[in-house]
Image (cartoon, rainbow, N blue to C red):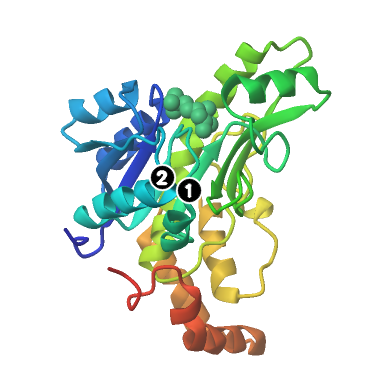
């Protein structure tokens, strides 16, 4: 299957109960988001698989036990090809992703982590291990991170973070519950952000951080991410400071028009560099898409 014009095909990978998977499914079906979940991959029977079946999404069980990276990646990539997958989202997937898969989907594969990376990340840092470590530390804030997945655990670039306060006396369970709540709001917003950039053929900038218990739908213009070298990327990141956090094609188009109109020399320079190198830099330029 290939993507319908204007809609990206998404695969979700999960191992557990799938509350993030549910949040992503609910979000993607509640309006036209420009992306559609086409496939769920689990490494074993899990609540996540049942949630997908309940709404008629194909589920593939790809066991990782006792299998080589090569076997796992061959089966995984074949399933992705079969469903024309453009974007991969890990939602509580507890197995390492083989390098062949992360390389094929570089810039198009995300994970959500229940802490503020790079703190409390790396091998062994998953589930309650993370929240226990946070509870035993003296940090004042924790939160959730959406990041790109590469070959190293939890080390891909950060796309979005949401900070929440860690109160003295919080138990690991208290922290876990509050972090999970923001995960369910942060992940869908970050996926909108990535997919809107991919559809507009630009590299997404990091979303402006959401702090403490700030609702996600406020104007965060003052809280924009730092300037990046490429003006077009910066403008795409700025779209997240738009009063509503949901992706807006009109806004992305507006940003691109602004770049086109700008008379500032650095903007014109960035634009021409962008035109020249777009096909090399964009993880899903038209020429590389399947
Ligand atoms: C979440 O805390 C997520 O950050 C981590 O795994 C957990 C999955 O929970 N990667 P759920 O299965 O989505 O409820």
Disc number placed over residue 110 in the picture, else none:
1
Q: Is residue 259 above or below residue 1?
A: below
Residue at the location (16% across, 58% down)? 1
- Residue 245: x, y in percent? 47, 47
Q: Quadrant of the C terminus?
A: bottom left
Q: Do we see residue 161 in this rendering?
A: yes
- Residue 264: x, y in percent? 63, 86
Indicate left or right for 170 with 146 as reference.
right
Residue at the location (56% across, 87% down)? 273
Residue at the location (24% across, 57% down)? 81
Q: Label 2 near label 1: C-beta < 8 Å?
A: yes
Indicate left or right for 251 with 227 as reference.
left
Of residues 211 and 229, the one drawn nearer to the viewer in this rendering? 229
Q: Residues within 10 Å of mark 1 (few under 14, many from 20)?
A: many
Q: Is residue 32 above or below residue 65?
A: below
Indicate which disc, 1 or 2, sits on the residue closer to the N terminus: 2
Of residues 251 and 165, the one drawn nearer to the viewer in this rendering? 165
Indicate left or right for 50 with 111 as reference.
left
Of residues 188 and 130, the one drawn nearer to the viewer in this rendering? 130
- Residue 51: x, y in percent? 27, 25
Dot 1 beta carbon under 8 Å from ligand 1: no
Q: Do we see residue 35 in this rendering?
A: no
Q: Residues within 10 Å of mark 2 (few under 14, many from 20)?
A: many
Indicate left or right for 83 with 207 as reference.
left
For disc 2, the marked residue is 89
Of residues 261 and 183, the one drawn nearer to the viewer in this rendering? 183
Disc number placed over residue 6 in the picture, else none:
none
Q: Is residue 18 above or below residue 288?
A: above
Mark 2: secondary structure:
strand
Toward which corner of the image does residue 121 lie, by quadrant?
top right
Whole-angstrom CA distance, mark 1 to mark 2, is 5 Å
- Residue 265: x, y in percent? 65, 90
């Amino acid at each position: 299957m290939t993507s319908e014009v204007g809609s990206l095909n998404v695969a979700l990978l999960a191992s557990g109960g799938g509350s993030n998977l549910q949040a992503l499914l609910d979000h993607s079906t509640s309006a036209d988001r420009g992306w559609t979940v086409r496939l769920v991959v689990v490494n074993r029977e899990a609540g996540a698989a049942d949630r997908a079946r309940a709404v008629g999404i194909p589920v593939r069980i790809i066991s990782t036990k006792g299998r080589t990276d090569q076997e796992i990646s061959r089966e995984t990539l074949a399933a992705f090809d079969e469903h024309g997958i453009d974007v991969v989202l890990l939602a509580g997937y507890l197995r390492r992703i083989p390098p062949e898969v992360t390389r094929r989907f570089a810039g198009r594969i995300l994970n959500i982590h229940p802490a503020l990376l790079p703190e409390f990340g790396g091998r062994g840092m998953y589930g309650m291990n993370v929240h226990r470590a946070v509870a035993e530390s003296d940090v004042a804030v924790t939160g959730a991170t959406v990041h790109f997945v590469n070959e190293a655990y939890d080390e891909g670039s950060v796309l979005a973070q949401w900070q929440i306060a860690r109160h003295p006396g919080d138990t690991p369970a208290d922290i876990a519950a509050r972090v999970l709540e923001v995960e369910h709001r942060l992940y869908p917003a970050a996926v909108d952000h990535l997919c809107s950039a991919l559809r507009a053929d630009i590299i997404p900038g990091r979303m402006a951080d959401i702090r403490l218990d700030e609702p996600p739908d406020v104007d965060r213009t003052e809280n924009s991410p730092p300037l990046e070298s490429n003006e077009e990327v910066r403008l795409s990141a700025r779209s997240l400071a738009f009063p509503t956090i949901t992706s807006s094609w009109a806004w992305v188009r507006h940003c691109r028009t602004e770049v086109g109109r700008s008379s500032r020399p650095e903007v014109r320079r960035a634009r021409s560099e962008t035109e020249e190198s777009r096909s090399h830099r964009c993880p899903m330029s038209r020429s590389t898409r399947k």
